[in-house]
Structures are given as C-alpha cells and as structure tokens.
C-alpha cells in the first residue's frame, strides 16, 4: 500500500464522517493528536466520527486492492 493511497483514503473517509456527524476533518485530527473534544460536540459524536473514518478507510483500501 502506498502512503499516498492511504492518505487519500483517510481524507475521503474524514469527509464522509463530516457529512454524517458534522465533525470537521481538522477537528478529528486534533482529537486524534491531542484528545481535545471540539467545542459544541460531545466525545461520543467525535468517537463515532473516528469509527466511521476507520471503517471507511478500510473499505476504500479493500476496494483499491491494497
């Protein structure tokens, strides 16, 4: 698996999570890096967005054959 393909899959997955939960990709990145829950959101919503990203990333990489 190339690094570029993985990064692209993560970006697409983060956009899908944003559509579903309203958690912006940048906010999700800060949560992963520092554990900060964005203002106005609950930790449950942010964790759900993270779960969507992980599932969607895995699905996209499977589709790509990596």
Image (spheres, grey):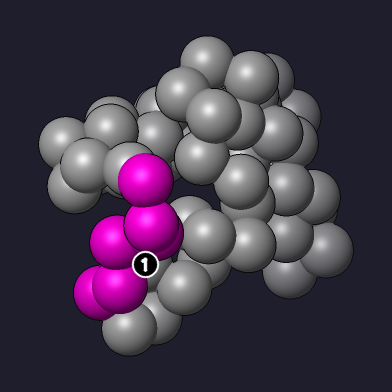
Residue 63 quadrant: top right
Q: Is residue 10 left or right of residue 42?
A: right
Q: Is residue 31 left or right of residue 61?
A: left
Image location of residue 7, percent across then percent down: 72, 59
Pick the residue in front: 57 or 19: 19
How packed mark 1 is, by other alpha carbons closer than 10 Å (few <14, some 14-19, many 20 or more), is: some
Image location of residue 48, percent across then percent down: 28, 31
Image location of residue 59, percent across then percent down: 53, 23
The answer to whether one can see residue 55 in this image is yes
Question: Mark 1 — residue?
Answer: 31
Pick the residue in front: 33 or 3: 33
Quadrant (top left/top right/bottom left/bottom right) for the C terminus: top right
Residue at the image position 63 percent from the left and 62 percent from the top: 26
Q: Main secondary structure of the magenta part?
A: loop
Q: Where does the magenta region start and end?
A: 35-40
Pick the residue in front: 40 or 43: 40
Q: Is residue 21 left or right of residue 40?
A: right
Pick the residue in front: 30 or 6: 30
Residue at the image position 47 percent from the left and 73 percent from the top: 30
Q: Is residue 6 left or right of residue 58?
A: right
Count of all numbered marks drawn on residues in the image: 1
Quadrant (top left/top right/bottom left/bottom right) for the N terminus: bottom right
Q: Is residue 9 above or below residue 62?
A: below
Residue at the image position 51 percent from the left and 40 percent from the top: 23
Image location of residue 53, percent across then percent down: 48, 38
User: Please, what secondary structure does the residue beneath circle 1 have?
Assistant: helix
The answer to whether one can see residue 62 in this image is no
């Amino acid at each position: 698996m190339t690094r570029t393909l993985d990064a692209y899959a993560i970006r697409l997955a983060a956009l899908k999570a944003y559509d579903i939960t309203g958690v912006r990709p940048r906010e999700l990145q800060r949560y992963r890096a520092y554990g900060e829950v964005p203002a106005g959101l609950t930790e449950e919503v942010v964790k759900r967005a993270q779960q969507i990203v992980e599932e969607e990333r895995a699905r996209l990489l499977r589709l790509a054959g990596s």
